[in-house]
Image (cartoon, rainbow, N blue to C red):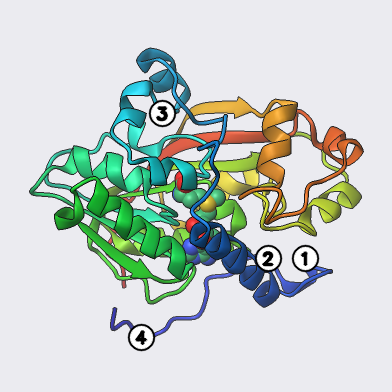
Amino acid sequence: MNKVKKPCCGGEPEEMFPKKTVTEIKKEVKIRYDKFAKEGGLAEGCCPLVGGRTESFALEHGLYSQEDLALIPRLAIRLSRGCGNPTGFANIQPGEIVADFGCGGGIDLVLAAHKVGPTGKVIGIDFAPQMIERAKQVMEEADLSDRAEFILLDIENPEVPDNIADVVISNCVINLCPCKPCVYKQAFDILKPGGRLAISDIVTIGDVSPKVREYFRSIWAGCTGGAIPEDEYLKIVQDVGFDQLRVVARHVLSPKELEEMASCPGKKFSPPFSKEKLAQMEGKIVSTKFVAFKPKNKFSL
Ligand SMILES: C[S@@+](CC[C@H](N)C(=O)[O-])C[C@H]1O[C@@H](n2cnc3c(N)ncnc32)[C@H](O)[C@@H]1O
C-alpha cells in the first residue's frame, strides 16, 4: 500500500460527462451502494440475471448454479448485484490469491475462497465502507474469514498494491467506473506476471444515439449509465497490456433484466427510467464475460 502515486493512465475526458463531474459521479455511486449495503440489500435476493441455474447451463452462460448459491450466506445473496459469475470461468486453483475488484457484499469472495482452499487467499476491494463491512460479515458467516482480506479503496487508485494476485475477478463493477483504463491498469499491476483476469460486466452493442446515451448517463449508478461499446471496452483491456483475451459468454438483457439493471442497486436507490427510454436501449445492453492474461515477462513498474 506504500506506492508512489502515478498519474492516471487516461480515460474519457471531463467533457464526456456534460451533466456531472467525475467526482460527482463517483460520489453518487459510492453513496448509493453504501446505503444499499447499510440496509442489508434486497429481500428478493440477487439479480434474475445471475441466479440459480443448473450446473451445465450456469457453466455455459457464466452464471451461478444452484450448487454455487447453496454455499452462499443469505446476506450475500441479498446484497448481490452482479451480472454473471466470474468464479465459474476463472479456473481458480487451490493456493491461489484472488482479488475481487468491487467485491460488494462478498458473493464471489465466498465462491473464490472455497476454490483457493486453506492455503490460498481472497482480497475484497471496494470503495463503499458499508459494503466492506458486509463482506467481512459474510465471510465470517461462511466461516472463511481466515482466508479473506479487505481493502477499502477506489479501484482506479494507483494505491492498489502491485504484483500480489494470481487472479483478478470483477462482477458488474467496471461499468460504474468513469475511467476504465485506470481500473484495468490497476488490475494489470496487482497481478503477478502470467496472472489472469476473469470479468463479468455490462457493455453496449449496436448504435446508441448520443441523446439516449446521455440520458442513460444521467443515472450513472444504475449499471447501464457508464456502459460503453463492447469493442471499445475490450480494446482498453488489450491496450493496457493484457493478451489472449477470450469472450467466454455473452447475454443480451431481456426487457425485464434491462429495467432492473438500469436502476441498480434497486429502484429505491437509483430512480427508474421510463418504459419509453428503456425501449430505446432494448437489445443493446449485454452482459459480457471474458478472460485475459498478463504476459509472463511483464512486471509492474
Ligand atoms: C453492482 S455492485 C456489484 C457488487 C459485487 N461485485 C456483486 O457481484 O454483487 C458494484 C460494486 O462496486 C463498487 N464500486 C463501484 N465503483 C467502484 C470503484 N471505483 N472502486 C471500488 N469499488 C467500486 C460499489 O461500491 C459496489 O459494491
Q: Amino acid at mark 2?
A: Glu
Toward the left, the furthest residue is 119
Residue at numbered disc 3: 64
> How many C-alpha atoms fall within 10 Å of the one at disc 3: few (<14), some, or many (≥20)?
many
Q: Which badge, 1 or 3, comes first in the chain's sequence? A: 1
**In screen coordinates, is 185 left or right of 273?**
left
| Circle 2/circle 3 CB separation < 8 Å | no
Q: Left or right: where does residue 268 sit relative to residue 211?
A: left
The residue at which mark 4 appears reads as 4
Give me the residue at 42% from left, 21% from top: 58
Describe the element under mark 2 as helix, strand or loop: loop
Q: Position of residue 287 (x, y in %)?
A: 58, 35
Q: Real-space Cα distance between discs 2 and 1?
A: 6 Å
CB atoms at circles 2 and 4 under 8 Å apart?
no
Amino acid type at image mark 3: Tyr
Badge 3 marks a residue whose secondary structure is: loop
Residue name at image x 77 percent, y 56 percent:
217
- Disc with the residue nearer the chain's start (2 vs 4): 4
Q: Which residue does the numbered mark 2 point to in the structure image?
A: 12
Q: CA distance from mark 4 to mark 1?
A: 29 Å
10 Å crowding of disc 2: few (<14), some (14-19), many (20+): few
User: Residue 107 appears at what percent x and percent y?
Assistant: 38, 44
CB atoms of marks 4 and 1 within 8 Å: no
Which residue is tagged 1? 16
User: Element at badge 4?
Assistant: loop
- Quarter of the view holding residue 68: top left
